[in-house]
Image (cartoon, rainbow, N blue to C red):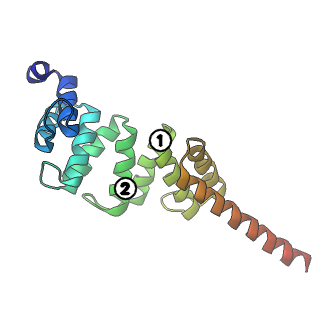
């Protein structure tokens, strides 16, 4: 694989970076992982862009840079990489490395949620529940929570149960007022 990576094969470069990142068959080295990911990322390899963004976000083997992480996550997100779309949303809502933009964060989380990423479905449900970046809708929140719950997402289950409990208590209060 090393020879193929050295000869410019993008997938081999990414795979070699992953081997170095995880210390599989080679001595673990974040610096070497970053070096190989850079080569593959420069060839528009979405998974390499995502992996390199994560390295920059956490400062492993490179100087920590939210700006570079945001740039790389966006490249991968634009290629349809669901986890990059989700992480782009996190950076956009927090304003780390980019200007804070809740509407754009919601856009990326929806794209990741539409691809079935459970964490993005939970987050998108939360956005609907709170009305951040989308119109507030408990019905939409419940639908997205349910999709995440179907994949075993425990936090989504907690949010769904709380949403349903609040909905029930609200209905009971409305009924009590109506019956007076």
**Crowding near the residue tagged with mark 1, few <14, some 14–19, many ≥20 C-alpha atoms within 10 Å:** many
The image quadrant of residue 37 is top left
Instruction: Give the image quarter of residue 91.
Output: bottom left
Q: How many marks?
A: 2
* Separation (CA) of disc 2 from disc 1: 14 Å
Horizontally, residue 105 falls left or right of residue 26, namely right
Circle 2 SS class? helix
Residue 13: give x, y in percent of width and height.
17, 27
Instruction: Locate residue 34, reporting x and y percent.
Output: 15, 41
Q: Determine which of the numbered discs, if any, sits on residue 24 in the image.
A: none
At which x and y percent is residue 141? Answer: 60, 55
Residue at horizontal 56 percent and vertical 44 percent from the top = 152
Mark positioned earlier in the residue sequence (2 or 1) = 2
Q: Secondary structure at mark 1?
A: loop
Query: In which quadrant is the C terminus drawn?
Result: bottom right
Residue 72 appears in view: yes
Which residue lies at the image location 34% right of the left edge and 50% below the top edge? 88
> Within the image, what quadrant is residue 7 found in?
top left
Instruction: Identify residue for label 2.
Output: 90
Residue located beneath label 1 in the image: 117
Asked if 27 appears above or below 167 in the picture, the reply is: above
160 or 131: nearer the viewer: 160
Local crowd size for mark 2, using a 10 Å CA cut-off: few (<14), some (14–19), many (≥20): many
Q: Is residue 166 left or right of residue 102?
A: right
The furthest residue to the right: 179
Q: Residue at x 40, y 53 (%)?
A: 104
Q: Residue 51: image x %, image y %?
A: 25, 41
Relative to 158, say whether 54 is above or below.
above
């Amino acid at each position: 694989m090393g020879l193929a990576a050295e000869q410019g094969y993008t997938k081999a470069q990414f795979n070699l970076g992953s081997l170095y990142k995880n210390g599989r068959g080679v001595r673990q080295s974040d610096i070497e992982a970053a070096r190989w990911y850079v080569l593959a990322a420069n060839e528009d390899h979405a998974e390499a862009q995502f992996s390199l963004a994560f390295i920059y976000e956490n400062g492993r083997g490179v100087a920590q840079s939210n700006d570079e992480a945001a740039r790389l996550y966006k490249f991968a997100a634009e290629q349809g990489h669901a986890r990059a779309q989700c992480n782009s949303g996190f950076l956009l809502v927090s304003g780390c490395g980019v200007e804070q933009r809740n509407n754009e964060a919601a856009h990326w989380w929806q794209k990741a949620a539409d691809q079935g990423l459970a964490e993005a479905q939970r987050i998108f449900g939360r956005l609907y529940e709170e009305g951040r970046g989308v119109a507030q809708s408990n019905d939409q929140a419940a639908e997205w929570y349910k999709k995440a719950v179907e994949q075993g997402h425990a936090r989504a289950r907690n949010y769904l149960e709380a949403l349903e409990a609040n909905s029930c208590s609200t209905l009971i209060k409305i009924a009590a007022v109506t019956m007076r």
